Image (cartoon, rainbow, N blue to C red):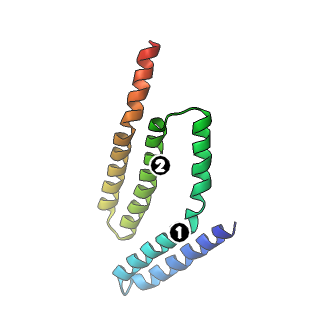
Amino acid sequence: MAVSFQLSALAMVAALLTVVIKKQSPELSLVLTLCACSLGAGLLLSYVEPVLSLARSLAERAQLDGKLTAPLWKCLGLGLLTEISSAVCTDAGQSALAKLVELGGGLLCLVVSLPLLQAVLALIEVLV
């Protein structure tokens, strides 16, 4: 719970500072935003391992092959990276770049998911 307050405080202070700094130095404002995002990600990093551990445990219990779960994790990572990158581009006033990043993230998720789709199609062929 304390991390939630720290993250919120970090975001509010960074947002306030970027609004003040943006008038005089838009570049410095963007750097501040990137630094705040990096610090926020660092605060959350320790909470990723328990989630990954539980997901691995569930995959083992369900006897899922790593080849089937890997695309899901890759898509999750791509989605998070795409969301953050798009938001930074939007904050920098580059909405066209933000949309390009979003389009690229969606396309890459499809590409990463191809092995999973092929496995599903092979399963359907066996069942039919």
Quarter assignment of residue 97: bottom left
Tell me if mark 2 has few (under 14), some (14-19) or many (20+) residues whose alpha carbon lies within 10 angstroms of its own: few
> Could you tell me which secondary element the residue under label 2 belongs to?
helix
Q: Residue at x 40, y 66 (%)?
A: 88
Nearer to us in this view, 18 or 32: 32
Instruction: Assign the C terminus to one quadrant of the image.
Output: top left
With respect to residue 123, does 72 lie above or below?
below
* Residue 46 percent coordinates (x, y): 59, 63
Quarter assignment of residue 32: bottom left
Q: Residue at x 62, y 47 (%)?
A: 54
The residue type indicated by label 2 comes to Leu
> In this figure, what is the number of numbered marks?
2
Tell me if mark 1 has few (under 14), some (14-19) or many (20+) residues whose alpha carbon lies within 10 angstroms of its own: few
Nearer to us in this view, 19 or 74: 74
Q: Residue at x 51, y 73 (%)?
A: 39
Is the C-beta separation of discs 1 and 2 under 8 Å? no
> Could you tell me which secondary element the residue under label 1 belongs to?
helix
Instruction: Assign the N terminus to one quadrant of the image.
Output: bottom right
Q: Residue at x 49, y 82 (%)?
A: 17
Q: Mark 1 = which residue?
A: 42
With respect to residue 2, does 99 lie above or below?
above
* Residue 8 percent coordinates (x, y): 60, 71
Nearer to us in this view, 97 or 61: 61
Task: Identify the mark at residue 76; answer none if there is no mark.
Answer: 2
- Residue found at the far top of this picture: 128
* Residue 4 percent coordinates (x, y): 64, 67
Nearer to us in this view, 13 or 95: 13
